[in-house]
């Protein structure tokens, strides 16, 4: 659910005018953060082994950095 919400918000933001993008980028950041937290919980309760956790969490962290950068650019532009 959160993975799909993140993708949906990114896609919506990519098609909007610059001044309309930021709310959707923020929503994408929030849903991605929830996804990363839930993944961490799965790892903590040993429902996910460390190798799988790392394999999944590294790309999610990179996506978070990219969304943060996008949000920062939008703040500067607006």
Image (cartoon, grey):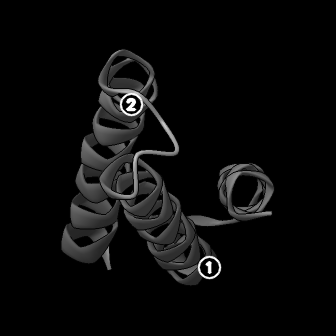
**What quarter of the picture does the N terminus occupy?**
bottom right
Picture layout, residue 33 above or below residue 48: below
Q: Position of residue 12 (x, y in %)?
A: 78, 60
The mark that comes first in sequence, 1 or 2, is 1
Frontmost residue, 60 versus 18: 60
Left or right of 65, for residue 8: right
Disc 1: CA contacts within 10 A as few (<14), some (14-19) or many (>=20): some
Q: CA distance from mark 1 to mark 2?
A: 34 Å
* Element under disc 2: helix
Q: Position of residue 49 (x, y in %)?
A: 40, 27
Q: Position of residue 23 (x, y in %)?
A: 55, 84
User: Of discs 1 and 2, which sits in the foreground?
Assistant: 2
Within the image, what quadrant is residue 36 found in? bottom left
Task: Provide the residue designation for mark 2.
Answer: 53
**What quarter of the picture does the C terminus occupy?**
bottom left
Q: Position of residue 63 (x, y in %)?
A: 40, 38
**What residue do we see at 34% from left, 67% from top?**
74
Disc 2: CA contacts within 10 A as few (<14), some (14-19) or many (>=20): some
Task: Provide the residue designation for mark 1.
Answer: 20
Count of numbered marks:
2
């Amino acid at each position: 659910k959160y993975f799909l919400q993140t993708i949906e918000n990114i896609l919506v933001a990519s098609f909007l005018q610059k001044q309309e993008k930021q709310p959707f980028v923020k929503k994408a950041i929030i849903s991605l953060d929830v996804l990363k937290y839930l993944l961490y919980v799965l790892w903590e309760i040993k429902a996910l082994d460390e190798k799988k956790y790392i394999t999944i969490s590294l790309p999610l962290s990179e996506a978070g950095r990219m969304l943060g950068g996008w949000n920062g650019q939008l703040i500067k532009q607006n």
